[in-house]
Amino acid sequence: MASRELKPIDKVIYSTGDFTVNTALSALGLIYTTYFLTQVAGLRPALAGLVPLVARTLDAFVDPMVGRLSDVTRSRWGRRRIYFLIGAIPFGVFWALMWIPPPFESQLANAIYYCVTYTLMGIWMSVLSVPYLALLPEMAQDYDERTSLNTYRTVGALLGVFAAIATRPVANLFGGGADGFALAGVAYGLTLAVPWLLVYRVTFERPEFAARPANDGFVDSIRTLLRHRNFNLLTAFFLMGRISMDLVSALLILYFTYWIGRSEDFELTMFLFLTTVVISLPLWLRFAQGYDKATVFIIGSAWWMVTSLAFLFIEPDWPRWLLFVLPPLVGFGYGVVDVMPWAMLGEVIDEDDLATGHRREGLYNGVFTFLRKLAGALGVFLVLTILDLAGFEKGAQQSELVRQMIRVLTAVAPAFFLALSIWLAWNYPLTRAAHERILGQIEARKGSR
């Protein structure tokens, strides 16, 4: 497909790719690990936390390899877009299998089954998502246009969270229990596969990028990437923010179930929370046009950090309406913590292009995704292990120690990592002006050839 510019409708369709990925990731964080595996499948919390840790660790090592493969692939269907055709159906199939209960009596055997299906689903999701993300800085080269496309992508991702929090209601429509979740898994699997055909249709690759592949070896490319100071700094504060997001995703359903005592309020609260995030993103996009992206990231992180600490002071007997006020306040800063680092990754890739002459969008996005998965899974595993040691068990009743641990972890753990992310991002050097100089030097290099 010839190179062209993206229209708003193209951006909307492109965002459906992240809708599918984030439906999966959010359902895994919000429902699958802390609710389905412990309350429906009956795994003890430490085993349930081990499932995503093992699966994501194994899957995460695939991400850099998929990214590198998409950098060097040459085909009539494109070097990256071809993977949307390859990965769509297996992604949906293994997603469905994750929710189908195995016929084993042993908890260990069940945990192994869930690890295997989770890992295979994650691998095929990587086959889709890493080339998908690698296309973004190629399609949108301008500093603000990248922020715009990432904002569309983030809105698609947030709509995926809406779909994820509907998992329990959809399972209940199918009869509830293990059978209801199995049927919901099949329905969701189809929903996750189909949009990738549309994404394939609207995306494009720039011929001049494909003409300059990364010709050095995989190991040499990894070494170059790991020596890239601004990439390492961006990755560090991105991971701190993402760990905060993963912790909130894992803990909120437990917070409403065992601290507040009203599990049924979880879906409504998440709806209000995500609606605020979606509404806030156009405002942040407009604000970002006048500031450096790191500055916007810091402001959003600080807002979320301060408001999230209020979860520590909420009491179960507070008026119900008051509990619906706080999550939207938190949501105003939440979306920025994710959208800005992804928008900033393109500038890092351009900086690498200037230094080396290679285009390595796939490898950079693969390593970025690899570290994000690994850090998030480790954070959730540690939190669930803490709850396991505190005595968390399947059922509606928990000890006072477990309830207090859920309360403290929900409020304090994300705030701690957000504080680290602010500190790391404070003097980020790859500003708007620095990126303009990089693009100017790249253009000058083209003219001298």
Image: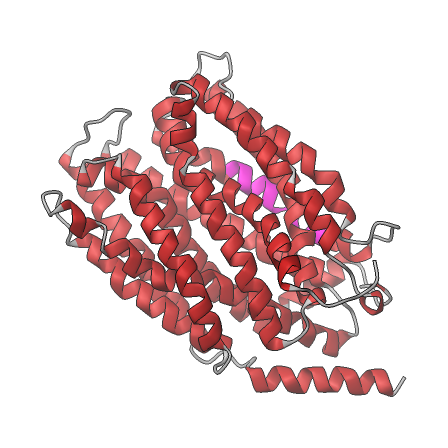
Name the residue located 67 percent from the left edge and 53 percent from the top edge: 132
Does 182 appear above or below 219?
above
- Residue 165, how many percent across, how many down? 40, 39
Does 189 appear above or below 307?
above
- Classify residue 39 as left or right of residue 106: left
156 in the magenta segment: no
Name the residue located 61 percent from the left edge and 69 percent from the top edge: 146
Task: Specify the quadrant of the image occupied by residue 433.
Answer: bottom right
Res 62 seen here:
no
In the rendered image, the quadrant that contains the C terminus is: bottom right
Observer-nearest residue: 422 or 2? 2
Observer-nearest residue: 54 or 200? 200
Magenta region, main secondary structure: helix
Image: magenta residue range: 54-67
- Residue 243, how many percent across, how many down? 42, 54
In the rendered image, the quadrant that contains the N terminus is: bottom right
Figure coloring: secondary structure
- State how many labels appear: 0
66 in the magenta segment: yes
Observer-nearest residue: 290 or 418? 290
Res 191 seen here:
yes
- Residue 334, how many percent across, how many down? 38, 60
Name the residue located 41 percent from the left edge and 67 percent from the top edge: 421
